[in-house]
Amino acid sequence: MRRIIALILSVFFIPVMRVNAQSANLREEKNPLLVVPYDSLMEDRVSIDGYVDIEEEEYPGRFSDPATGIVVNWGYDDSLIYVALEAKGKGWLAIGFGSPLMDGANMFLGYYTDDSAVVANYVGVKHTHAPAKGNENLLDDWEVDYDDETNITTVEFAYPLRWEGLKGVKISGLVPGEVYDLILGRNPKSSSFSTKHSQRSHYRFTLAVKPEPQPIPEEKPKEKSSNMDN
């Protein structure tokens, strides 16, 4: 009797488990590999001011995440990655590099209220996060603002590609051509980083390979003309 019950359960549940696994894989495949564009003039192109100038194409790359409602603007140069997160409403917004889950991710959380505005560097620890330790000076250029007319919160920052001394992260920096995990999170109803996200998403991304410098052609010396007597 037990064998019959076990056979029935296996016939019913195993196909369901396979379908669920396939559905999860399909959901994962729906998110394409993202590419962060390279621009050697990012420092001149971007102003870290809590506002993204779309008409002037301030950022060379931009994508929208339907799961969280976050729009990510980004680009990188020889030493820094520049990021601006935009979303309707208030509450906190977050992006994390280097892990498909919070654990071990290098995370950046920001919020705006009438009383304060903060962008902070955290490291994921299991299902929560803690302030980054080992090198607290990596995040020194940031801004966050809220536009009453558009109802958009913008979290903007620049961050080194190499995370020297940062503890608890799964990767030590971002290298062009390598593929990394990226997570997005948000809680539109709270500005407290201790509250859990209500929306999240996962992607894979890479930094575009830098173009090879083109050699400057050498100028050929002009031949001197001479007058010859006939």
Image (spheres, rainbow, N blue to C red):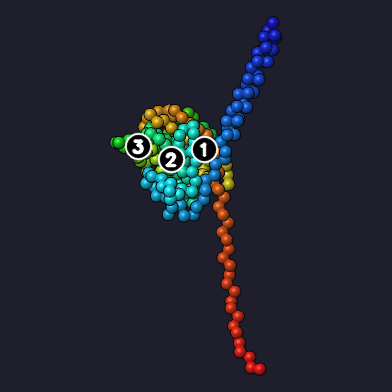
* Disc 1 target residue: 182
The residue lying toward the viewer, choosing from 183 and 146, is 146
Residue underneath mark 2 = 85
Specify the amino acid type for callout 1.
Leu
Q: Is residue 174 visible?
A: yes
Q: Earlier in the sequence, mark 3 or mark 2?
A: 2
Residue furthest bottom in the image: 230
Instruction: Give the residue type that dot 3 points to.
Output: Tyr
Q: Residues within 10 Å of mark 2 (few under 14, many from 20)?
A: many
- The spot of residue 26 in percent (x, y) is 60, 30
Mark number displayed over residue 205 = none
Q: Residue at point 56% right, 36% down?
A: 31
Question: Mark 2 belongs to which amino acid?
Answer: Leu
The quarter in which the C terminus is drawn is bottom right
Question: Of helix, strand and loop, which one carries label 1?
Answer: strand
Residue topped by disc 3:
112
Taking 230 as reference, is 160 above or below it?
A: above
Q: Quadrant of residue 206?
A: top right
- Local crowd size for mark 3, using a 10 Å CA cut-off: few (<14), some (14–19), many (≥20): many
Q: Is residue 13 left or right of residue 109?
A: right
